[in-house]
Image (cartoon, coloured by chain):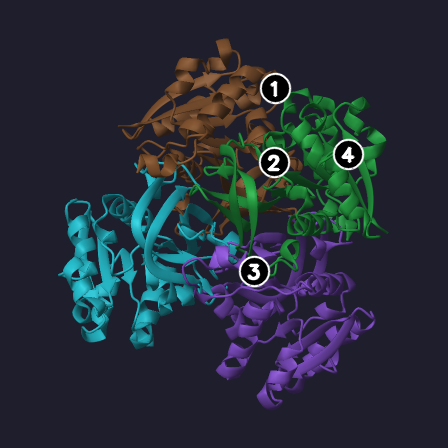
Chain colours: A green, B brown, C purple, D cyan
Amino acid sequence: MPIRVTIWNEFRHEKKNPQVAEIYPDGIHNAIGNYLKKSKDFSVKTATLDEEEHGLTEDVVANTDVLVWWGHMAHAEAVDLVVERCYQRILKQGMGCLVLHSGHFSKIFKKLMGTTCDLKWRADGERETLWVTRPGHPIINNIDDHFVIDKEEMYGEYFDIPEPEETIMISSFAGGEVFRSLCTWRRGAGRIVYFRPGHETFPTYHNPTVMKVIENAVRWSAPTPGPTPHTYGHRPTGWVDAKK
Amino acid sequence: MPIRVTIWNEFRHEKKNPQVAEIYPDGIHNAIGNYLKKSKDFSVKTATLDEEEHGLTEDVVANTDVLVWWGHMAHAEAVDLVVERCYQRILKQGMGCLVLHSGHFSKIFKKLMGTTCDLKWRADGERETLWVTRPGHPIINNIDDHFVIDKEEMYGEYFDIPEPEETIMISSFAGGEVFRSLCTWRRGAGRIVYFRPGHETFPTYHNPTVMKVIENAVRWSAPTPGPTPHTYGHRPTGWVDAKK
Amino acid sequence: MPIRVTIWNEFRHEKKNPQVAEIYPDGIHNAIGNYLKKSKDFSVKTATLDEEEHGLTEDVVANTDVLVWWGHMAHAEAVDLVVERCYQRILKQGMGCLVLHSGHFSKIFKKLMGTTCDLKWRADGERETLWVTRPGHPIINNIDDHFVIDKEEMYGEYFDIPEPEETIMISSFAGGEVFRSLCTWRRGAGRIVYFRPGHETFPTYHNPTVMKVIENAVRWSAPTPGPTPHTYGHRPTGWVDAKK
Amino acid sequence: MPIRVTIWNEFRHEKKNPQVAEIYPDGIHNAIGNYLKKSKDFSVKTATLDEEEHGLTEDVVANTDVLVWWGHMAHAEAVDLVVERCYQRILKQGMGCLVLHSGHFSKIFKKLMGTTCDLKWRADGERETLWVTRPGHPIINNIDDHFVIDKEEMYGEYFDIPEPEETIMISSFAGGEVFRSLCTWRRGAGRIVYFRPGHETFPTYHNPTVMKVIENAVRWSAPTPGPTPHTYGHRPTGWVDAKK
């Protein structure tokens, strides 16, 4: 059975900024989606902010294995009800959640992290070098020990996140800053991945190495196939032995 | 300078349930506060749900180094504004936060964790044995490698929390369940401690070993004295070298 | 391609103790091996202490994806050269390593952990209850939120291991002790799993739930298929840009 | 009671290389020791490779709270017996261990980590910028959110260490590499700190910010004052209740 991926994109920059529209004529979501569609391992949907319920209806979310999230200028417009729906599916059914770039400030990511997720930034289009700090991790399968993106926005530490469970890549920038660029956490039954690159004015999602990391991250964060029971609530005296 | 501790208690059970009032005639907050006041290292305040702004005014929170939190039946009545105030002080000024027992379901703890914090439970008053899993940690200073509480409520795994950064004690219960009972996390500049024991119908906060752990946890979670700058936002090209 | 599993067993108890021989007439290694052989996903070899080079020749190790290790009474007899060979393959080629029960005191496990791996124990054949503390993890795929083994040796905390990266199951014992029974760590490119049950005088490796966990652990710790370069050593000025 | 610090230095470069001797005429150990001696909080000893038992006799080690370790060209000459002595004191009595710079390849550090501790390097004297990734941690008390060292050796990822429990500073280098420069782990009752800067041909241990971090790290890794019992071995049936 293919992994059911829903790629969510704010899809506003592409409509307002001709520079962005030129790079991503069909939107960032379709740039990513078209890449994933090349493999039969994925069943790909997209959803955007201005669709009804942001395209994340109960039915869509209930049939999503991995949610990819790109947002930037309109985080506040995401309706709490929809965010809560995604959140519950992550924790309880183990939906994976891959948060990209400026999604660090999205409601869903801040809610999962429990922190402000603030950082330093500079959008001058400088060299970013990403270094592997956890060789052998499935998310960097077939990735060299580092790779370079010629022009990207700088994000700098301190990045206000909980200590990652796995820090897989760390970036340096031409200006001298560093950033934990590829990190994972678990929340409930769900696996969360943050991956830094992807400013809308640079063609980052046309970079094959970036896309390979995204593909790997989607595979890795897909839920474990079997049931993941985690019952809660009152348990009477003797139930452990009674059940045996 | 003493550590400024504010002990927050819902303080409802003590007013409604004579059994609880008998154990804690002045409330759980004062049972804990009176213990801490024996040392000159602490400057102790208390605050309760039914006070104005729950006793956690801007002034009180701005002058608190460590916040201790006990709540149970009225989590939902905690005003979001006050919770947000505590949350911001934890992340930005490094206020410590020690969450006790049924505080696992408090707004502040769930917001810091990013999870549901749900669990199994049974309030039959059974034996709890707490085992040290991180010897040498300051929070179990002067604590033996395990200790027993004769009658406590059972809390059982799965406890829906993020993987703790430090798991310091794990409990077993007479019924066969286990629980991660003493755990820490960091959020922003603040240190978070969860400590399990303390059901209101048992005299747990009169147990000297329990109180010693609480005292140690307050000491450990107090903010580092020096400044902890963590600037965010736009940084111009060349600022790192300019500043040097 | 199947996962190439080598199951290493000390294979001494089975020869010396008729009680053990009755439970495992072909040795613990074959009890585990025969289970795994039911699936075409695994290519299974066994190796034992008294074979030449303990059955872990250069060729065998170089062609192993996951090494399963059971030892108890003769840890000291493991030749350092062979241990080092396994260690290097774990760190550099990402061979998985699943250490079972009394293997906690094996040379390979202590070398990987950097600690004494000491613990409390009692071999009275008492009830062990294993509780899931990380639902959704692939290693507990299709496992309920807890399961009971009627008769097992007790292992008790403090278990002197580094803080696990993932604590997946915690046991309680009838006597009141607790133990972190299913844990993972990464060392270099390799994934390490410790799984507690399996005292030689009890039929634990005939328990289908235990065997399912072992099968899951072998799958999870297999190396990522692609290359995992992690080059070391001197790098000249300008090499990052030169390579671009 | 002051913290009893023993600063161990290989003390070979200073004798062989006039450039190093000029920077550290009394050796790196005394450069660090003289700084710490300014505070009454520390009782400082030094020890070097060419002393009997490397200056780390049973008596010295048994009376050390924190061991600082600098070594580079002669790691192999450290006698295993002495290394084992330090190792046991760390795990069992909670001696702190601060490993500096090229100490990453020392026997004691590799034994504690369980990995090769290998890395990339280039000793061209380039700019290193260290960034705080864990504000509020005691080890960076009174340190700004980053600081710059004008000339240092480069160390680059992948640094083959276990995932740190706390990653407190990350460096960038002028050449584009990154490195996890200030990290902590716990082993047994002991706290381990690795701090990167300090190549012998640069005056790094005269940099007041570097020295402040070292001072903070010594304070943080000192053992918890009370007893830290962690008993091991056989426990008879019923001992938990018997002890109560």
Q: Which labelled disc corresponds to residue C186?
A: 3
Residue in the foreground of this view, choosing between B101 and D190: D190
Image spot of residue A33 (x, y percent): 77, 42
> Distance of mark 3 from mark 1, alpha carbons?
43 Å
Query: What kind of residue is marked 1?
Result: Ala
Residue in the foreground of this view, choosing between C88 and B58: C88
Quarter of the image where one finds residue A7 = top right
Front position among marks 4 and 3: 4
- Counting other residues with Cα less than 10 Å from the Cα at mark 3, is it few (<14), some (14-19), or many (20 or more)? many
Image spot of residue A172 (x, y percent): 48, 46
Front position among marks 3 and 1: 3
Residue at 36% x, 66% y is: D108
Image spot of residue D230 (x, y percent): 42, 57
Q: Which labelled disc corresponds to residue A199?
A: 2
Query: What kind of residue is marked 4?
Result: Asp
Front position among marks 1 and 4: 4
Residue at 66% x, 75% y is: C64
Q: Do the residues labelled 4 and 3 touch (CB within 8 Å)?
A: no
